[in-house]
Image (tube, helix red, strand yellow):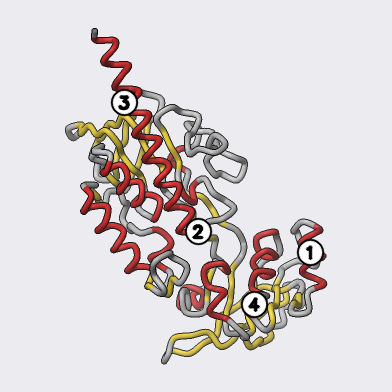
Amino acid sequence: MSDVQHESVIIIGAGPAGYTAGVYAARAMRKPLILAGYQPGGQLTITTEVENWPGEKEIQGPDLMVKMREHAEAMGARVEEEQVANVDLQTRPFKVVTDSDRHFTADAIIIATGAQAKWLGLPTEERFKGFGVSACATCDGFFYREKEVIVIGGGNTAVEEALYLTNFASKVTLVHRRDSLRCEKILEDRFMKHPKTEVIWDTVLDEVVGTDMPLGVTGAKLKNVKTGEVSDINTHGVFIAIGHAPSTELFKGQVEMRDSGYINTKPGTVSTNIPGVFAAGDVTDEHYRQAVTAAGMGCMAALETDRYLATLEDSLSNAAE
């Protein structure tokens, strides 16, 4: 086993929540260590144009994450591209082990591991990600003004995304593998009554069709699950809306989670059920899932961490007297 390195604060994850937590924790002179994983930057690294980040009329997702990392480091946070393999939140100080067998202890931990959109796994889906294939209508709907789009799915997420897209698109077609929707009735009623919407039942996405120069979506091949028949549909955008999965596997059995796998926090805070462990961003937020809300929670986590550590220091000082 390698030597154990002790840290005041360890931030696990390097998306908007993790980097913002790093900025605030560093400004509080807590010298935070951000364990960023092998692909730092979170979901924004696979996003092209970002037009809803305050202060930036338009910025590429990867560029925004580079700027956030530089900001955190300029404040004094340290970022290491170490993938966390194991955590022990039952001991004091907390223990963290990485894939490269580095061992850390920490007085406080901020969990900012995010969530990942669920994908279908089609080669053409992967090819056009960020160029006509998206998993976030709120992020990308603006780019499809007066264009036709399709949404894949049939639950609350899919219908909510489809309804949101009607604010921009000329037509929104929902493609669902079953013959009835699985969303709440009120959402179904709103969707069915909307003049811009249509449903294709018993059907799955078989292939995304598009061009190479420039890279972009022009259509899709749809397959009827009952007949096997494949049909073509013209579309400018394909939105995959089959849900998100929080990156919480590391923490199962240690922090309280909802049935969906998202980490529970105390109302109005980012505090978990374990004192000294905080959760920020998409790892706890299954409703908004926006970069700006994640960043806000990162700020909250750092402020709460500083207060927790100050209380811990006071108690240790009093015990020593």
Could you classify mark 1 by the number of other residues whose Cα lies within 10 Å: few (under 14), some (14-19), or many (20 or more)?
A: some
Label 3 sits on what residue type?
A: Pro
On residue 188, which mark appears? 1
Label 4 sits on what residue type?
A: Ile
Residue sitting at x 74%, y 58%: 183
- The residue singled out by tag 4 in the image is 150
On residue 154, which mark appears? none
Q: Earlier in the sequence, mark 4 or mark 2?
A: 4
- The residue singled out by tag 3 in the image is 93
Q: As rendered, which of 254 and 309 lies closer to the eye?
A: 309
Position of 235 with respect to 131 (left or right) is: right
Q: Vertical placement of 45 versus 170: above or below?
A: above
Label 1 sits on what residue type?
A: Glu
Q: Secondary structure at mark 3?
A: loop
Front label number (2 vs 3):
2
Give how far across and how far down residue 61 sits, in percent.
39, 68
Give how far across and how far down residue 164 sits, in percent.
65, 69
Q: Earlier in the sequence, mark 2 or mark 3?
A: 3
Q: List the single residue furthest toward the top.
A: 321
Q: Earlier in the sequence, mark 1 or mark 2?
A: 1
Q: Secondary structure at mark 2?
A: loop
On residue 290, which mark appears? 2
Q: Secondary structure at mark 1?
A: helix
Q: Secondary structure at mark 4?
A: strand
Q: Earlier in the sequence, mark 1 or mark 4?
A: 4
Residue sitting at x 29%, y 63%: 66
Position of 158 with respect to 65 (left or right) is: right
